[in-house]
Amino acid sequence: MKKLGMITIGQAPRTDIAPIIEKYLDGRAELVQVGVLDGMSKEYIEQYLSPEKDDYVLTSRLVTNESVIMSREKIKPILQEKIAYLERQGIEQILLLCTGVFPGLTTSSSHLIEPDHIIPPTVKALVGDRRFGVIVPLHEQMETLYPKFSPFGLEPFFAVASPYHQDKAGYADAAEKLKDNVDIILLDCMGYTEETRKVISIKTGLPVILSNAIMAKLTSEMI
């Protein structure tokens, strides 16, 4: 059977997201999961991988269901090592389970599927000239993620709600902020689930795009 490698920037397995990916793989490939933070304690991550001033900030989930905040600059070498590890297993397609921007990642022979290369142009095609809302996990990401969308003529209106804290109040606040200001919403983190999409859609009455579902659908077409 073919294999699809999947790298989370948190810890594997991602029992919250893997079922979404596997739904679209429909048994045509085995999902092989690895995590950038595998084997690390929360205390270690907070001591050695936390962001410094002006770092590009990311968040993900541990197998304990806790969330952590990390510096892209600090985890990028580990991420590159995980890519090399999957290549050594003979895996030819590798999905990065993160919507953040990671300049300069490389492979020797495998194809690396990077959501930040795919989601913005895809969303632009869906949004057109309509008003565009984006929900992100962290306040710090509102500024750093804007350049991901602006080259495609998108001017996102941001709101914040964490996918990792059962943040019902945060979802309600984000929905309230967006519902009268945008026409379509993107959940811009791989940690949001179908349940989140339904909650935001019901509260706003708007179409809501789930990033991991887009990537699952498109990736499955390559298997």
Image: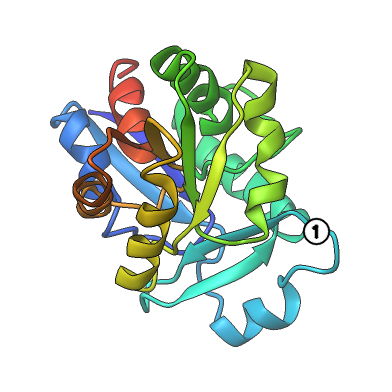
Quarter holding the N terminus?
Answer: top left
Q: Quadrant of residue 215?
A: top left
Whole-percent x and y of residue 78? Answer: 67, 55
Residue 140, placed above or below residue 23? below
Residue found at x 28% / y 25%: 217
Asked if one can make out residue 166 in the rendered structure from this viewpoint, the answer is no
* Count of marks overlaid on the render: 1
Name the outermost residue toward the bottom.
Answer: 43
* SS assignment at label 1: loop
Residue found at x 34% / y 72%: 169
Which of the pair 173/85 is nearer the observer? Answer: 173
Residue placed under numbered mark 1 in the picture = 55
Residue 223, placed above or below residue 208? above
Asked if one can make out residue 100 in the rendered structure from this viewpoint, the answer is yes
Which of the pair 167/119 is nearer the observer? Answer: 167
Image-based side of 186 in relation to 59, left or right: left
Q: Quadrant of residue 117?
A: top right
Colour scheme of the rendered structure: rainbow
Residue 192, placed above or below residue 210? below
Quarter holding the C terminus?
Answer: top left
Image-based side of 95 in relation to 171, left or right: right
Image-based side of 141 in relation to 207, left or right: right
